[in-house]
């Protein structure tokens, strides 16, 4: 058997209990995973209210993060006066916040 060929699982313990999938799980012959009929874990079977609830939570989360970033930048004068900090310190805080927007999805997305 060459390195490009793959083999099936050695025994039943290599396969999840109760589930068998078509394919070998390789790039050439991937597993074909399908939901069972009337599976409650299938998002297509969720109620409309549950789908809207999940969409609302995701939307609100994006709104909250965006609002927080703009609220920080708009409050520059108050922060500079109240905490007696320099403009550079304020800009570092704003830069780190924006940098989090850039790097965060790249780090957390694959996880």
Image (spheres, rainbow, N blue to C red):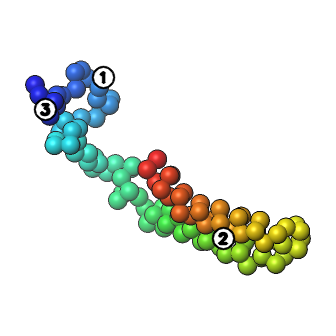
Q: Would you place residue 59 above or below residue 30 in this image?
A: below
Q: Is residue 31 left or right of residue 103?
A: left
The answer to whether residue 53 is visible is no
Separation (CA) of disc 3 from disc 1: 21 Å
Q: Position of residue 98 (x, y in %)?
A: 61, 66
Q: Which residue is mark 3?
A: 5
- Tell me the mark number nearer the camera, choosing from 3 and 1: 3
Separation (CA) of disc 1 from disc 2: 49 Å
Q: Mark 3 falls on what kind of element?
A: loop
Instruction: Name the N-terminal-most of marks 3 and 1.
Output: 3
Q: Nearer the viewer, residue 52 or 21?
A: 21
Separation (CA) of disc 2 from disc 3: 51 Å
Q: Residue at x 59, y 63 (%)?
A: 99
Q: Which residue is mark 1?
A: 13
Q: Position of residue 104 (x, y in %)?
A: 54, 57
From the image, which quarter does the N terminus lie in?
top left
Q: Residue 69: which disc?
A: 2
């Amino acid at each position: 058997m060459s390195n490009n060929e793959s083999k099936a699982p050695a025994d039943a313990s290599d396969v999840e209990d109760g589930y068998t999938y078509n394919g070998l799980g390789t790039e050439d012959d991937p597993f074909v995973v399908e939901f069972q009929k009337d599976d409650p874990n299938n998002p297509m079977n969720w109620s409309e209210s549950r789908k809207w609830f999940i969409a609302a939570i995701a939307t609100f989360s994006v709104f909250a993060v965006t609002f927080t970033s703009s609220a920080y930048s708009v409050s520059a004068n108050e922060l500079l006066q109240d905490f007696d900090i320099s403009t550079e310190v304020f800009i570092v805080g704003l830069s780190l916040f924006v940098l989090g927007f850039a790097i965060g999805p790249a780090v957390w997305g694959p996880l």
